[in-house]
Image: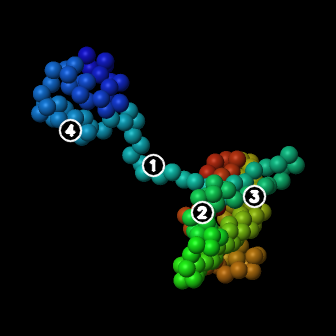
């Protein structure tokens, strides 16, 4: 009887289940609460917190065994200027104050978008510096990454060490050996 109700349960067709099982409203509500209280995952990883990691940078080897570094365009696709704002700015139906407000907000959005693109540029050139030292590790030839310092990257790129630190904080790259935190390199 219980197995026949499984599909109904998945579809949340509780009236049908209640009718099939001849349950009272009270006993059915108790059963639902009992089910909600149980950990029903067949396998639970208690170490990981199940955070989904989306890499910011993707690296691949081309046919000549040279690294190709690209930003993850899926991240950039999340950001766009609202079509409502763009339509409002292009239509002449706004008052002068409304047009000024919309224009200022579009300019702010463009500035944020440019900042995001600059962040990717910095991350990309940092990645290129990392690849110089971590080439063998990222190709899977070397077992552990080579020691390196943020200061070395900053000096090579002629940028402040704090810029490097902020750029790689909570950032990941996808490589032939998997997704790796920049901090781990």
Residue 33 is drawn in which quadrant? top left
Q: Which residue is mark 2?
A: 83
Whether residues under marks 4 and 2 lie with C-beta atoms below 8 angstroms apart, the answer is no
Whether residues under marks 1 and 3 lie with C-beta atoms below 8 angstroms apart, the answer is no
Q: Which residue is mark 1?
A: 50
Q: How far apart, in angstroms, are the residues tagged by discs 3 and 4?
A: 51 Å
Between marks 4 and 2 in the image, the one whose residue lies nearer the viewer: 2
Task: Measuring from the top left, give residue 22's x and y in whole percent.
Answer: 15, 20
| Depth check, front residue: 147 or 181 | 181
Between marks 3 and 2 in the image, the one whose residue lies nearer the viewer: 2
Residue 80 is drawn in which quadrant? bottom right
Q: Furthest residue to the right? A: 64
Q: Is residue 52 left or right of residue 173?
A: left
Which numbered disc flags the more N-terminal residue, 4 or 1? 4
What is the number of the mark on residue 33? 4
Instruction: Look at the image and tell me in which quarter the N terminus lies.
Output: top left
Q: Is residue 156 left or right of residue 161?
A: right
- Secondary structure category for the residue under label 3: strand
Q: Is residue 124 above or below residue 144?
A: below
The 10 Å Cα crowd at callout 1, few under 14, some 14 to 19, many 20 or more, is few
Q: Residue at x 37, y 36 (%)?
A: 41
Can residue 31 be spotted in the picture? yes
Q: Is residue 88 left or right of residue 39?
A: right
- Secondary structure category for the residue under label 2: helix
Between marks 3 and 4 in the image, the one whose residue lies nearer the viewer: 4
The 10 Å Cα crowd at callout 2, few under 14, some 14 to 19, many 20 or more, is few
Q: How far apart, in angstroms, are the residues tagged by discs 4 and 2?
A: 44 Å
Q: Which residue is mark 3?
A: 69
């Amino acid at each position: 009887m219980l197995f026949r109700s499984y599909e109904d349960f998945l579809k949340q067709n509780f009236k049908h289940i209640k009718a099939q099982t001849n349950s009272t409203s009270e006993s059915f509500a108790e059963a639902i609460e009992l089910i909600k209280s149980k950990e029903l995952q067949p396998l639970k990883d208690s170490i990981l917190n199940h955070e989904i990691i989306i890499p910011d940078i993707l690296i691949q080897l081309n046919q000549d065994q040279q690294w190709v570094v690209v930003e993850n365009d899926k991240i950039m696709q999340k950001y766009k200027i609202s079509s409502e704002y763009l339509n409002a700015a292009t239509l002449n139906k706004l008052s002068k104050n409304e047009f000024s407000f919309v224009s200022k907000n579009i300019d702010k959005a463009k500035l944020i978008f440019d900042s995001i693109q600059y962040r990717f540029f910095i991350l990309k050139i940092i990645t290129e510096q990392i690849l110089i030292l971590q080439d063998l590790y990222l190709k899977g030839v070397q077992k552990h990454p080579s020691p390196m310092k943020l200061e070395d990257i900053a000096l090579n790129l002629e940028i402040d060490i704090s810029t490097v630190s902020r750029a790689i904080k909570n950032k990941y790259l996808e490589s032939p050996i998997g997704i790796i935190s920049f901090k781990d390199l």
